[in-house]
Amino acid sequence: MTEPVIEVRGLNKHFNIGGGFFSKPNDVVRAVDNISFDVMRGESFGIVGESGSGKTTLGRCMMQIIKPSSGSVKFHGTDLVGADQKTLRQIWQAIRMVFQDPQSSLNPRLRVIDLIGQSISKAEGLKGAALADRVSELLTKVGLRPEFLHRYPNAFSGGQRQRLGIARALATNPEVIIADEAVSALDVSIQAQTLNLLKDLQEQYALTYIFVAHDLAVVEHFCDRIAVMYLGQIVELSTTTDLFQNPKHPYTRALLEAVPIPDPRARKPRRLKGEAIPIVASKGCRFSPRCPHATDMCRETVPTTRKIDGADVLCHYAGDI
Amino acid sequence: MMPLTPMPTEPLVEMRGLKTHFHTDDGVVKAVEGVDLDIYPNRTLCVLGESGCGKSIMARSIMRIVDAPGRIVEGSIQYRSAEGSIVDLAKVRHGSRQLRQIRGQDIAMIFQEPMSSLGPIQKIGQQIAETISLHRDVSRKEAKEIAIEMLDKVGIPRPRERFESYPFELSGGMRQRAMIAMALSCQPRLLIADEPTTALDVTTQAQILDLIAELKEEFEMGVMLITHDLGVVAQVAEDVAVMYMGKVVEKGDVYSIFERPQHPYTRALLESVPKIGGEKRDRLPAIRGMVPHPLARPTGCTFRTRCDHFMPGICDVNEPAMVDIGDSQAACFLHLEKTHD
């Protein structure tokens, strides 16, 4: 059995909204609401959800880019929440992020050698020709030509920029990569190339991925286990096969139904009505206003996560409906 | 399986040899390079392709809203009006009364980003009512009532209250609906939708696609939907056209395209997307390389640089013409060979 690399326990991030400088906030958005899970060594852990579900905030809270309100995020036993800058810097070498938009996450004024080399020279003190060699090696690993060393990011296409982002993440020999919508902005053919590259790198360097995405087909292809988020909570956490073959939470089912299948003979009526509204009364299940199975109990009592056939499900009726 | 809508006899729009080029300092970008396509009433034509293949510019050419330095350099866009007269949209003068009347009234367009067609400082209801007053002979009060009715039709809750909302007060999905309400307020005969659901969540996307399909049936509207999402195409299209580097490389009805794709590019596109519930594959069969730079168009067949069936001496010498293969048409020498035999 593999051991957990990252353990998240009771993680919360609440944002106050409304209210003025002197007045009290009107409301609280629970962007990340009491989330706990483990990420095992060498696995690809998917986090899916629609916009506003808190998946990006969760990733950033884990990295302490956004300070969580409470809870803990342990990396090999060391808690990142409340850790000092020195410890954080070390952990940031071991856990790296790749973002959705390589256009805005790569500094346009830095050449490739500086973009990728920065963290290497900081961590290992490499300079000059040795540094150039390391960066060229990284470029080759992500399928870019080493001649690109002295170019600026704007000389690259979207797919190539995403490869630069991946090369930068790899520069510090990380254990874990958090990929936040890393392939969402790419065309299908480039998306397939990038997913293949990530898989190859995982095999080569025994990487652990936390893969945040909204595209369910991509997540099914890429991940071993998946957490489905709705309005700040994990409503279902299960293995990929189980989640797709036997979804237990009504929201997971609705989400799977809404995905357009690339087969014209599989046209189907689907229909989840309404929209996710981030501020909800603390009473009851958050999905109950849109849930086709909701009863008075759902509207009154907050559900707790239960284990059903190996899956963690946040629903009063999971397993019965 | 949904029954195929019977093919109406006369197309709404016939594009023939359409070329839209951008004359830049670095050279001529051939964004649309000889497109022949028909759009029929009460049918949805999906235009599929990766970014940079010219699908948006083709759509904008129909509306005549291509930004400078781009312009239509060749070809025709024959539009058949409700009275049966035929107008060549490629030749209509910019800013002419005829063009303004067709645009908005006969042909409406919706975009990926609703804020590109909604003004930020005017209430959405007013914007829709204004469009109605411009194109239809109604009083201000009637225009308001029609606008509220449209808001209701596109599934915006409490339309009378929402009439008074500003765009920033609405969520992305609701804004998209408001834009659709505006586009449909004059009951256009053709709706051009350029990636209308790309920025939306899947559950909202499903609602918007359903809405467009319902309204299409109700008004017998022709729809041209531009997308790169194969799932969306399979769900809503009757006809499909696949574009690559400014050309239509394959077209046909949705079943032919998905079940018997003829062009290597279409096949590769279909294979490269992960499918839910599909067989587990470690690697996706990706198309190698990337779309060439628009100023460096390959000679002959433009797809040959990425094609697994590249035949030296054939594909790089001549441009393949469209040939009929069963129910679809494809521009590829693999099929030309067969028809010659």
Image: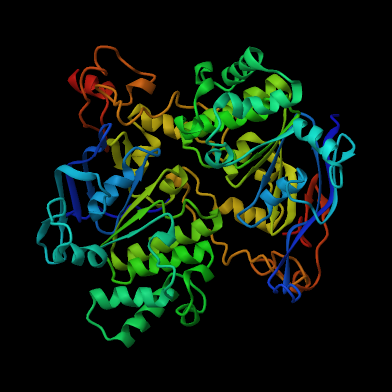
State the residue in front, B256 or A106.
Answer: A106
* Residue B299 placement (x, y as % from top left): 25, 21
* Residue B316 placement (x, y as % from top left): 26, 17
Q: For the view shown, which residue lies furthest in the right direction?
A: A77
State the residue in front, A168 or A193.
Answer: A168
Q: For the view shown, which residue lies furthest in the left direction?
A: B85
Q: Quadrant of residue A143?
A: top right
Q: Residue at x 39, y 36 (%)?
A: B259
> As displayed, is residue A288 above or below residue B322?
below
> As displayed, is residue B114 above or below residue B226?
below
- Compared across the picture, whether A16 is left or right of B301 comes to right
Q: For the view shown, which residue lies furthest in the front direction?
A: A128
Q: Quadrant of residue B17?
A: top left
Q: How is the image coloured?
A: rainbow
* Residue B139 placement (x, y as % from top left): 27, 86
Residue B13 visible in the picture = yes
State the residue in front, A236 or A17.
Answer: A17
Q: Quadrant of residue A102?
A: top right
Q: Residue at x 90, y 37 (%)?
A: A77
Q: How many marks?
A: 0
Which quadrant: the C terminus of chain B? top left
* Residue B34 placement (x, y as % from top left): 20, 37
Q: Residue at x 72, y 74 (%)?
A: A26
> As displayed, is residue A180 above or below residue B279?
below
- Compared across the picture, whether B171 is left or right of B301 comes to right
- Compared across the picture, whether B182 is left or right of B331 comes to right
Q: Residue at x 27, y 46 (%)?
A: B58
Residue B282 visible in the picture = no
